[in-house]
Image: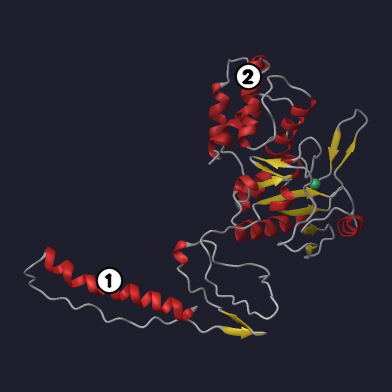
Amino acid sequence: MRKILYIIGLSIFVSCASQQPTKNTTTNPKPTTVTTAPKPTTPTYPKPITIQGVEFYTTNIADITKNDNTVSYGSIVSAKPAGYKVVKTYFPAIGQNFRQKYLILHYTALDDDKSLMVLTQQSVSSHYLVNNLGNNEIYQLVDENKRAYHAGNSSWRSDKMLNDTSIGIEIVNNGYTTDSIGNRVFVAFEEAQIKKVAALAKDIVTRYNIPPTNVLAHSDIAPLRKQDPGPLFPWKRLYEQYQIGMWYDEVVKQNFMSQLVNTNFEINSNTSTMIIKIQAALNQLGYDISPSGTWDTNNRKVVEAFQFHFRPEKFDGIVDAETWAILQALNQKYPLK
Ligand SMILES: [Zn+2]
């Protein structure tokens, strides 16, 4: 391969050099100064190292400016066909991207021991488990290149079944209890857990270049079934302190709020036209909801999931003026591409 590239490179140079005098004589027949073409330098390529009989270039010798995906992370898996040698040339194709497009956050609704047992011994799993033991360990249960079974039936924007394209982080947390009048009382996350999740999430979104719109709660991608990691998960802090995920600009939200003053939003928002507009905006942000013009149990759960993430002070599934303003501010900031 090196020899072939060398020949190609040399022939390109020869071709360019042979054109140079022709161009000069045509455009400038009486040159006052004669410039000497630079002497060709022999291209040098790094020598491959051989590991277990496989040639392996440790330096990327392709044109890195044309390809953002030239760095490999984690294990590099290659075939080992009988009787042949696979050469890991490090000539990355432009036509490639990461399979890991999403980062999905969960709580386990179980304690440490049960979380570990369920996520390793049963049919559900996650790539990482953030314990609640106050130590500095994060457990990896599934290789990042493999699928973990954490998302289930799920959807965001045009993507479905996000186990295929996501990394899942489970956080040990008991979820919620129900009080005497039927309200859910969610359990707060420990500070040490938040810091672990932030560091881990930062590492993952940076390595895979996961966009802010794809860092999501399980409830965002499966709102009819799931409520985790719930309204006490600090999405705003993750955005502000670690630049992870989506959050709206407060000024833009206030602008949308001010447009709703004196419009009697609470009443107008229940007209069919306005409901369709709100449902379409939820769908535009990414939620799996079809604009129907009415509120039913299912699409109220979508509103609830939105509120868990972006309006955690109020998660009753009813769109108030602030919820609507936040939704519009988010769609303005993170438009569909
Ligand atoms: Zn979950």
Dot 1, how many residues are within 10 Å of its Cα: few (below 14), some (14-19), or many (20+)? few
Can I make out residue 314 in this image?
A: no
Residue drawn at x 82%, y 55% as measured from the top left: 125
- All told, the count of numbered labels is 2
Labelled disc at residue 16: 1
Dot 2, how many residues are within 10 Å of its Cα: few (below 14), some (14-19), or many (20+)? some
Mark 2 / mark 1, whichever is N-terminal: 1
> Dot 2: what SS?
helix
Residue drawn at x 70%, y 39% as measured from the top left: 309
> Dot 1: what SS?
helix
Ligand 1 is within 8 Å of the C-beta of the residue at disc 1: no
Image quarter of residue 202: bottom right
Residue 131 on image: x %, y %: 82, 58
Residue 43 to residue 319: above or below: below
- Toward the viewer: 217 or 158? 158
Amino acid residing under circle 2 = Met
- Toward the viewer: 326 or 302? 302
Image quarter of residue 122: bottom right
Ligand 1 is within 8 Å of the C-beta of the residue at disc 2: no
Per the image, the residue denoted by label 2 is: 274
Disc nearest the viewer among 2 and 1: 1
Q: Is residue 25 left or right of residue 251?
A: left
